[in-house]
Amino acid sequence: MRTVLHVGPSQTRGGMGAVIQLLAANAPEGWNAEIIPSHADGGVIPVLRAWWKVRKELGARLQRGNVDIVHIHTATRWSWKRKKGLIKIAQSADIPVILSLHSGDFDRHCKERGPEVHQICSTLHTVVLTDLWQKRLSPWLSESSVIPNPVAHVPVSTERNRMQFLLMGRSNPMKGQAIAMNATKMLRGEGLDVTLHLTGIDHNEPGIVGHGWVDGDDKEHLMRTCGTLLSPSKWEGLSMAVIEAMARGMPVLASEASAGVFDKSGEIVETTAVAYSEAMRKMLDGNTWGEMATSGPGEAEKYCLNQVIPMWGKLYNEVVG
């Protein structure tokens, strides 16, 4: 059996960590998978400790041998700076490197650091999340492949309440929480008894419930019972919340950052509170909502593990071959 070593923020909150965990738990046929975490939640000190630790652990693990590919997962800014050092460690050990680009603003990063990105990516194989990202980043990348984020098999729920809206994500203004909250207030001002559920933040007022960070049963309950997912993000790579909602039969109202991810199972909405309030109002209609919900699982099939994992197996075999 060959071994792929995933290096990235596998133990931190967010989509990238979820992707790494899914890939490691579902290694392609003929492969074992291991993980070395590269990041920690909790502020500057835990981040620095994780950085010092991953450099040491990666070097020691490669010295022990039996690693065929180092699969590094990166975002931008400081994530990129840290991963540059890890790439050098792997390449110094003469181990092939695959670099997965997860960030939804990597094009902006390339505009700032394009020559450096091109120099590094020309020495390894880069993987992007969508055809659109491959086209957008092509001026700075060398050889690249398109492999989407995977979603595990989840049941289609029949418990949904169309008056309940959900926004999944960490506490960050780029996720568009303010847009969703203002849109909800507009609808409630019209007398519509809608509720917005937010993860990642603690904020509570009539019709708006902040749950903080959720996982496990709490996340499952929200994903199973809320009627529509909102994703008014300023940017996204390929939102795990969006593709999981599709697979579950939950319609999606998303910003232009999710363009091309779905067709009939969602709608692209201008990132203003007025536009989102209008789109949310339409979701209260059973026929419109039902058509989107029915389309989701079929459109999400291309993101399912049984479709995505073989793509990784093919790439891993090509890289080591």
Image (cartoon, rainbow, N blue to C red):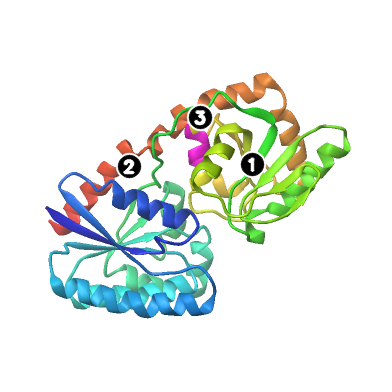
246 inside magenta stretch? yes
**Type of residue at label 3?**
Gly
Pointer 2 or 1: first along the chain: 1
Q: Quadrant of residue 125?
A: bottom left
Pointer 2 or 3: first along the chain: 3
Badge 1 density bin: few <14, some 14–19, many ≥20, Cα 10 Å: many
Q: Which residue is mark 1?
A: 166
| Most distant residue in the front direction | 217
**x, y (%) of residue 275?**
75, 42
**Type of residue at label 2?**
Val
**Type of residue at label 1?**
Leu
Q: Residue at x 42, y 57 (%)?
A: 17
**x, y (%) of residue 107?**
50, 62
Q: Which residue is mark 3?
A: 296
Q: Residue at x 56, y 37 (%)?
A: 221
Q: Residue at x 71, y 23 (%)?
A: 285
Asked which secondary structure carries label 2, the reply is helix
Closest to the camera, between mark 2 and mark 1, is: 1
Asked which secondary structure carries label 3, the reply is helix
Above or below residue 27? Residue 298 is above
Q: Which residue is mark 2?
A: 308
> Foreground: 45 or 75?
45
Q: Quadrant of residue 218?
A: top right
Is residue 316 found left or right of 37 in the rendered image? left
Is residue 14 found left or right of 50 in the rendered image? right
Badge 2 density bin: few <14, some 14–19, many ≥20, Cα 10 Å: some
Q: Which is the main secondary structure of the residues drawn in magenta?
A: helix
Q: Which range is magenta?
A: 242-247
Is residue 261 found left or right of 170 in the rendered image? left
Pointer 3 or 1: first along the chain: 1
